[in-house]
Image (spheres, helix red, strand yellow):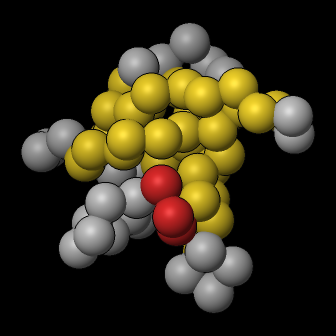
Amino acid sequence: MKGIVNRYSDKKKQGLIEGQNGENVMVYEKDIPFLTLLHADDPVEYIVEKTVNGIKAIKIKEITK
């Protein structure tokens, strides 16, 4: 799945990705590869994982603009 980082808080260690299908997906620091920094409006590629609390993004890769 592809999407755009809507927001990411280093302080809270979580953020939100808006998928290309319009669905918002949570992202957590533990699911971001080492040395990858996310900022608002960054294009990313990820896999959606269903959890008991909803859906989240895993295996996140930043796409070069």
Asked if one can make out residue 23 in the rendered structure from this viewpoint, the answer is yes
Q: Residue furthest left?
A: 64
Task: Describe residue 21's horizontal placement relative to residue 35 as left or right.
Answer: right
Task: Describe residue 25's horizontal placement relative to residue 42 as left or right.
Answer: right
| Residue at x 51%, y 64% (from the top left corner) | 30
| Residue at x 39%, y 33% (from the top left corner) | 46
The image position of residue 6, as x and y in percent, is 56, 49
Is 15 in front, or is 7?
15
Is 2 in front, or is 28?
28
The image position of residue 31, as x and y in percent, is 48, 55
The image position of residue 54, as x and y in percent, is 82, 32
**Residue 30, above or below 9:** above
| Residue at x 76%, y 33% (from the top left corner) | 51
Q: Residue furthest top?
A: 21
The image position of residue 55, as x and y in percent, is 72, 31
The N terminus: image quadrant: top left
| Residue at x 87%, y 39% (from the top left corner) | 53
Task: Describe residue 44's horizontal placement relative to residue 63 as left or right.
Answer: right
Q: Residue furthest front?
A: 52
Picture quadrant of residue 38 = bottom left
Picture quadrant of residue 39 = bottom left
Asked if one can make out residue 6 in the rendered structure from this viewpoint, the answer is no
Picture quadrant of residue 25 = top right
The C terminus: image quadrant: top left
**Residue 32, above or below 2:** below
**Residue 47, above or below 11:** above
